[in-house]
Image: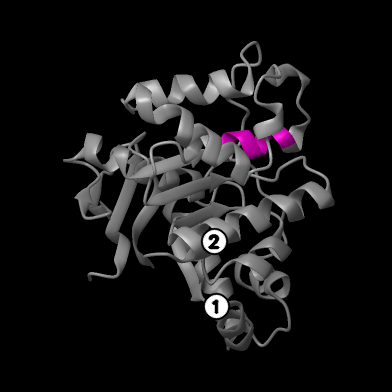
Amino acid sequence: MSDIIIYAEKLKKQFAKNIAVNEINFEVKKGTIFAFLGPNGAGKSTTIKMLTTMLRPTSGVLKLAGHDVTKERDSARKAFGIVFQDPSLDEELTAYENLELHATLYSIPKKQQYNRIKELMTLVDLWEKRSAPVKTFSGGMRRRLEIARGLIHEPKVLFLDEPTLGLDTQTRNTMWSYVKKLSHEKGMTIFFTTHYLEEAENVAETIAIIDHGQIVARGTTKQLTKETGTKTLEQAYLKLTGSTIRDDTDEGNDGLNARMARRNKALR
């Protein structure tokens, strides 16, 4: 398992009688781009919250960069960076000040901060805007700054939760070019979620699809389309998860069993 950076075995999260994540198993290889897809209420967000130490698993094994996420929370946190779906920058501070604050929180020595911040802001084409207040930035510029902030402590894994939500096509394409550059040049593992399935199809090397608390399929786009007898990832995704509009709640075991029965019938 030396090449595995994220490992989950029988990972479960239960809220009262509702099982949000039902003993799932998956692993992510170092330096790869991994997409974690699923409808609203499928257990996707719960899994990410467990991976990033915001929720404790009910049971199972969960490791990140060799650290037990439940027992070694501080070590696990140092191993990842995260870009949340919702904006989390301080709009009144400059771009540089936002990164400087984050660097201080991660105990990066003062004498190293300038070079580190310059390197990252140059990477995302924002160095010339370092003295500008974040409130003057466009949505795409803010996303790029958030990525730079997530990398300030040189994490081994970068989590991106719906990173392109609300961005125009040009900005989305630019952002993904940065992400691919990070993975290929720095050997960083990227774990992302998105509802734009063409992004996963174009960017991800491996994909896992979760529905009603269980992983219903995983593999490359080619493997998933072959398994489902479809031509695109979107078609495969809809065949595996259905076309019914979801809310943000899980259905528990009854909904899970019904969904799995329909899925198995569709794949016959």
Q: Which of the two labelled residues, at mark 2 and mark 1, occupies the earlier sequence position?
A: 2
Is residue 24 at least partly visible in the picture? yes
The verdict on residue 247 being magenta is no
Query: Label 1 is placed on what type of residue?
Result: Thr
Which residue is at the front of the view, 207 or 175? 175
Q: Residues within 10 Å of mark 1 (few under 14, many from 20)?
A: some
What percent of the width, then of the height, locates residue 108?
34, 28
Please state if 193 lies on the left or on the right of 69 as rendered: right
Q: Quadrant of residue 93?
A: top right
Chief secondary structure of the magenta portion: helix
Which residue is at the front of the view, 80 or 56? 80
Q: Secondary structure at mark 1?
A: loop
Q: Which residues are magenta?
A: 141-146
Query: Label 2 is placed on what type of residue?
Result: Ala
What percent of the width, then of the height, locates residue 241?
61, 65
Disc on res. 220: 1
Question: Across the whole image, how many numbered discs are drawn on residues?
Answer: 2
| Disc 2 target residue | 35
